[in-house]
Image (spheres, helix red, strand yellow):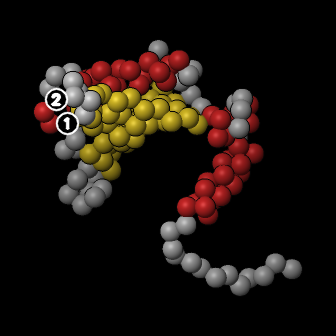
Amino acid sequence: MVSRMFRLETEVDRARRDLLRRRLRDTNTAASPVLRALRGTPDEREAPLHVWALDANGDLAGGLVGHTWTTWLHVTYLWVDARHRKAGLGSRLLTEAERLATERACTASRVETWDFQAPAFYRKHGYEVVCVIPDYPPGITEYTLTKRLG
């Protein structure tokens, strides 16, 4: 008989987080014919993707942090220092990330951004809004955008 007594804990625990993530991936993979058909383990199918822009002094001028998973690029962060904005650096970072993702057999890309950040920037680069969440956080709208690559 399974015990119905549970102790709940609320501390941040990275080891448990990673264990939970692995178990959820295993459950999802077992339940999905599409995920089962993909080559490699879930960890092998997800790979970090970083693109950095350094100025003449070697200082960080901008960067893109994301990852590829199955056939998708997920752009997590894209930032350009205020001194270098409006010079095309964000476009170069995004284009390079999409190129690298395509080399990894990605066919699509996704990004979340807030209304005061860059929805127009992503639309200019061929992304389409697929989700809008008003008041996330309060007073701000979050957009999820996707793009077909290749």
C-alpha distance separating marks 1 and 2: 6 Å
- Say which mark, if any, is on residue 81: 1
Residue at 52% in and 32% down: 68
- Say which mark, if any, is on residue 84: 2
Position of residue 94 in the picture relative to residue 36 (left or right):
left
Position of residue 30 in the picture relative to residue 81 (left or right):
right
Residue at 35% in and 30% down: 52
Q: Whole-percent x and y of residue 75?
A: 40, 36
| Residue, far front | 57
Cβ atoms under marks 1 and 2 closer than 8 Å: yes
* Residue type, mark 2 in image: His
Is 19 located above or below residue 97 in the figure? below
Residue 123 in view of the camera: no
Position of residue 49 in the picture relative to residue 145 (left or right):
right
Is 4 located above or below residue 42 in the figure? below
* Residue type, mark 1 in image: Asp
Is 30 located above or below residue 137 in the figure? above
Residue at 20% in and 57% down: 139
Task: In this rendered view, identify the residue nearer to me: 109 or 83.
Answer: 83
Q: Image quarter for residue 66?
A: top left
Element under label 1?
Answer: loop
Element under label 2?
Answer: helix
Q: Whole-percent x and y of residue 22?
A: 66, 52
Q: Image quarter for residue 5?
A: bottom right
Number of labels in the image equals 2
Q: Whole-percent x and y of residue 103?
A: 53, 17
Residue at 51% in and 74% down: 11
